[in-house]
Amino acid sequence: MALPIPSLQDVVRLTGPDVATTAANFRRHLRGAGPVWGYNPSKRLAKAVFSLEMVRDAAVESCGRIGHKLGRPHNAQVGGLIWDAATERGQFMCHDLSPRMLNLRSDIAIKVDPQFFFIEQGRPVIFYLQPRRGHVPGVDGLRVIATAIHSLFAIDELSAADLLLLDLSMPTGCNERAVVSYSFSDLPPLPTIDIERLFQRFVDAYDLVSAEGVERKPRRSRPAAERGDDLFGNPPAE
């Protein structure tokens, strides 16, 4: 059975300066049990916060009442920080963006999912949320993510689009999250050759670890609410 492909954020985070380092990181990733909760509640809230009139307490409460109990305080905190960032920019009509696949090889593709875009001062702005406190790429890694978004989404009618990458991680040495907003000016697209070399290191590491027969440790299942309920209504009947 083929090894699972990590998320874009994790591929970027796991890819080191050489294949050996990347393979070691990937082995560790596969042998971990994985989180029992995630940030789906706060990710799904973001569009509503940017497009609806909402008080901060409503954003916090909406994110903090569903999903795994261990994740609710973290999602609630992220919901409030999304509200803070949205309030500084204004209220917009937001348009959904369907995920697109970044093909590294015919059998290896990574989902890139910036969720939605809005129009600000006549220019489309693509929104991407980085909600984790830790286990996140640094600025160089965020630039890789921005480059992937630019190559897949800043095309056709969105060719002049800007980026709002909202990073809510906790900086090294700090005890609290920091809210940092990045645009394409802050994270300009990398040269194609640099991106190709980076992802080739991951592909080579993936092949190496696969050939070793390493298997992913079984993941802990998440509750149904974590996979998608209505944030503003009752969960659907099972």
Image: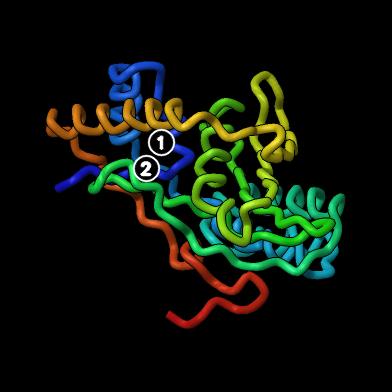
Please, is residue 36 above or below residue 200 in the view? below
Residue at 55 percent of width and 53 percent of height: 153
Residue at 66 percent of width and 59 percent of height: 117
Residue at 13 percent of width and 33 percent of height: 213
Residue 185 in view in this figure: yes
Marks 2 & 1, CB-CB < 8 Å contact: yes
Closer to the chain start, of discs 2 and 1, is: 2
Structural crowding at the residue carrying mark 2, measured as other residues with C-alpha within 10 Å and reported as few (<14), some (14–19) or many (≥20): some
Q: Which residue is mark 1?
A: 11
Q: Nearer the viewer, residue 195 or 55?
A: 195
Q: Which residue is mark 2?
A: 6
Q: Nearer the viewer, residue 198 or 157?
A: 157
In the rendering, at what x and y percent does residue 88 appear? 86, 50
In the rendering, at what x and y percent does residue 65 appear? 64, 63
Q: As drawn, is 232 to the left or to the right of 29?
A: right
* Residue 95: assigned label: none
Q: As drawn, is 176 to the left or to the right of 8?
A: right
Q: Amino acid at mark 2?
A: Pro
